[in-house]
Every structure is written in C-alpha cells, then in structure tokens.
Amino acid sequence: MIELQRCSDKEQWDEYVLELGGHPLQLWSWGQVKSGHGWVAERVFAYDEDKVVGAAQVLIRRLPLPLRAFSYIPRGPLAEDEYKDEFLDKLAVLVKRDHHAVALSIEPDTTAFEKPEGWVRATNKVLSAETIMLDTTKSESDLLADMAKKTRQYIRKSGADVKIRQIKKREDIEECLKIYQQTAARAGFNLHNTQYYLDVFIQMQDHSPIFAAYNGEEIVAFLWLAISESTAYELYGGMNELGQDLRANYALKWHAIKKVKEWGLSHYDFGGLVAGGVSNFKQGWASEVTVLAGTFDKPLSPLYTLWSKGLPFAKKALQTVRRKK
C-alpha cells in the first residue's frame, strides 16, 4: 500500500523529477506558470513507507457547469512499475474528492503504456502523441544522415545567412513574441497573452532556453525550449517573412539540437506533429515518426460520456483547455 502526500518543497520536487529523467512539463516551474493562468497545480508524491516511489504534477482546470473541473498530468506521471497502477488510481480518487473532476487524463512520456483496470483510451487529447524525437546521444554525423537530403542542404545554406544566439533580455524576448504573433496569424492558431510567455521565462529560467536567428541585428526567427535533465521539448517557435526567405528555422533548429547534445541531454522532442507545412518541415529531420502511448482517462463522473463525445458544451470546455495548455 502506498500513501499520497502533497509536496510543497520546490527543491525536493525538482530533484526527484530530474534524477528520475522526468519531462520538463513535470518540473515545479511549469506548474507555477500554469497556476498564474487559470490552472491549479498539485504536486503529489507516492510513498511506500519512507521511500518516494512516484510523483505526479497534476494540473486542474475549472470548467463550466455541469462539468466542474478537468484534471491532467502532462507527460507523466513518474512511478516505479510495481506502483504505477495503484498510484494512478489513488490520484484519481484525490482529484475526484478535492476538485470534482470529470476525469483524470494522463499523457505518459513513453511509447508503450498498459492502462490500469477502469482506465480508457481517451477520445480527447491535449498534446499530440505523434512527434519527432531525436536521440541526441548519437553523433552529429548520424543525426545528419537520418535527415532528408533537403533538410541537410537547407541547414548549410541558412547557416551562411544567419547567426544564432541564446537570448535572455526582455526586449529580445518581446521581439520574438512579435514574430510569434505573425506566425500565429499566418498559421491560424491562438496565442496566450504576452505575460504568459514572459512568465514561462521568469519561472523556468535555465530550464527554458530561447534561441534566436539574426540577420544582421534583426531577429528573424526564434525557438523556445523547455528542458529537464534528459529531455528538450519545443514549446514555441516562429519566423518573420525574412526568416522564411532565409529558411532560418533550419540553422536555428540544428543549433539548438547541437546545444542539447553539448548539455548532455539524451532526447530532443519536436513538440508534436500537426497537419500542414510545419509537420512536413519537422518530418524532414528524422526517418521515422515517434508515436507516444497517447492519452488515457480515468472517468470520474456520470458526465464523462458527454465530455468524451464532445457535445457542444464539452467541446467549448475542451477548446479552453487546449488554448490554455
């Protein structure tokens, strides 16, 4: 039997997540970002007597009545195999009791996942299961060899036209966010407000490096990561028109990948695949798409069927969750 205990110690939490190779979305600081923008973050340890055997950062979002709340574990939880099922079931009891959640949803950071009894494969998702995942323990030559020929060509060509720097000044970040607004307008996706992105940088600090491509003194493209001890995960990125003409995203991404290798991380996650040109661009970086296990739910309310089948009020609520992820 395990016992659950909420954690209020940032240092203790991050030490465990980092030592166990946890995903950056399970770091304390990511929960702090979400807590400032409409979510509640709860960090829960599983104990077998005095030993920690699991951890989960659970995000809870209030939903319109009658749904009440949605609970979600992004790229988690972390748990030793023998404790996984019991941990998940006890987490479900916790979020039902304390938050009246319609479901507990998880998106494990694994390619295989055996769901516990009573759990179902979800019809709704927050993060894409399909992604490009590079093994950054490989040599640069092996990584290049696994790319499409055009990707290698554009890396070389764009590298001659732009210079890459890691940025940390607020004014530079704001320039990147202007580019992101242009990118969102072109691609037709929604953005958070500016303060949200500034909070990501303020809260995550060294766990959220930002790289920018410059043509002269002008920023023409940027790439924003979240990193843990083992994984780099792409959060945001974009280009202006000049950046598109120069194909600056090729030199930029290759620079970020090499930095991740230099820092000793073992995985570089492109942050998911979606339909369209961005997906085609990403798929040029590896010969195979990585398919993670996907999204699984523990239904916790009689309204779960309405939520999962996406009736109008549930669709609206889910769109809110996705915009705020």
Image (spheres, grey):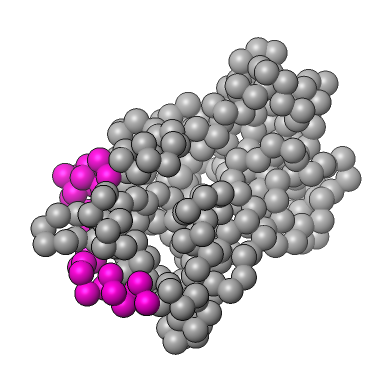
Q: Horizontally, is 111 left or right of 163 in the view?
A: right
* Towards the viewer: 288 or 95: 288
Please state the extent of the stretch shown in magenta in the rendering.
153-179
Residue in view at x 58 percent, y 59 percent: 131
Quarter occupied by residue 200: top left
* Residue 226 placement (x, y as % from top left): 42, 55
Note whether residue 228 is visible: no
Residue pushed farthest right? 117
Question: Taken as a whole, is the magenta stretch helix, strand or loop?
Answer: helix
Residue in view at x 56 percent, y 54 percent: 273
* Residue 165 placement (x, y as % from top left): 22, 64
* Residue 82 placement (x, y as % from top left): 80, 60
Q: Is residue 157 above or below residue 86?
A: below
Residue in view at x 69 percent, y 31 percent: 95
Residue pushed farthest left? 217
Residue 246 located within the stretch drawn in magenta: no
Q: Is residue 215 above or below residue 107?
A: below
Residue 171 located within the stretch drawn in magenta: yes
Q: Horizontally, is 34 left or right of 315 in the view?
A: left
Note whether residue 63 is visible: yes
Count of numbered circles in the view: 0
Quarter occupied by residue 306: top right
Q: Horizontally, is 141 left or right of 212 in the view?
A: right
Residue in view at x 63 percent, y 64 percent: 290
* Towards the viewer: 26 or 15: 26
* Towards the viewer: 195 or 29: 195
* Residue 196 placement (x, y as % from top left): 36, 35
